Image (cartoon, rainbow, N blue to C red):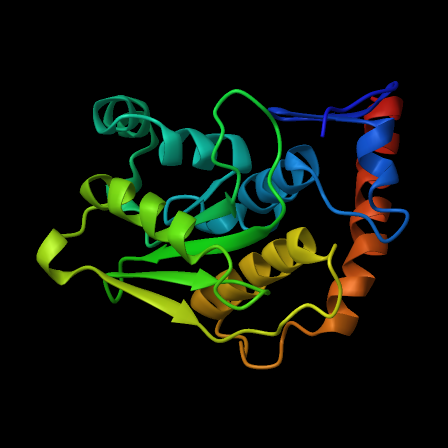
Amino acid sequence: MASTGPTVLSYNNCLLRRSDLALLEGPRWLNDQVIAFAFEYFEYDLFKDFSDDVSFIGPDIAQFIKLSQDAEVGMFLESLNLAFKQLVFLAINDNDSDTSVGGSHWSLLVCSRRDSTFRHYDSSGSFNEHAARQIAMKMQPHVGLEKAHVMFAQEQCTQQENCYDCGLFVICNAEHVCKHHFQGTPLTGAVTQASVTRKRGELKELILQLAAQDDVK
């Protein structure tokens, strides 16, 4: 979904327009830009104290990894120093085209060096498992894990009760997995349909607050 309208916020490498913000104002499917913003906010603000140990890879790069040749993936990922990260988060989409924006579902893939496992959190059963496995196989040589010891786990997680909240589940699952790993907060029960619904308003308010801060600089 292409962004349109005036710019609302420029945040690090992410540009949000009025149409992006509107996705948070009602029961709508989130696009690449909103998820990319959340991941950048996690990396550069909320979890900045753990920046040496965690990396958040947004939808555009995850899609590139999935659809590109192994050599291209290696050249691109080398600069990210992923082999030294404890956790790597990726936002996964089921779109198989490299020429158009699309897809119908988001899920979260987490690479954990602690137990050499790619963990897939999918709020719609195993809908995106094939795409997640594709990316995990391409990521393995670049995250400091030996192929013989790498595992893939389809994690149990709260399931969405509608057809449009998958992107919010990705954001909420990523936040709480990171909190659990680095801050020891409980993971079980942390993400519910109610908390995901609240996250829409919280994200909108956060974006507007950051935009207001930019205006006064």
Is 49 left, or right, of 76 in this rendering? Answer: right
Looking at the image, which residue is at 78% across and 72% down?
A: 194
Q: Position of residue 61 (x, y in %)?
A: 46, 31
Is 22 left, or right, of 135 in this rendering? Answer: right
- Where does the N terminus fall, quadrant-wise? top right
Q: Is residue 88 visible?
A: no
Q: Position of residue 122 (x, y in %)?
A: 53, 63
| Foreground of the two, 100 or 3 | 100
When asked about the image quadrant of residue 64, the answer is: top left
| Foreground of the two, 62 or 48 | 62
When asked about the image quadrant of residue 69, the answer is: top left
Looking at the image, which residue is at 60% across and 40% down?
A: 103
Q: Is residue 35 above or below residue 165?
A: above
| Foreground of the two, 176 or 76 | 76
| Foreground of the two, 212 or 77 | 77
Q: Position of residue 102 (x, y in %)?
A: 62, 34
Looking at the image, which residue is at 19% across and 59% down?
A: 150
Q: Is residue 64 visible?
A: yes
- Where does the C terminus fall, quadrant-wise? top right
Residue lying furthest left? 148
Q: Is residue 97 above or below residue 184?
A: above
Number of numbered discs overlaid on the protein picture: 0
Q: Is residue 37 above or below residue 148?
A: above
Looking at the image, which residue is at 18% across and 51% down?
A: 145
Q: Position of residue 42 (x, y in %)?
A: 58, 47
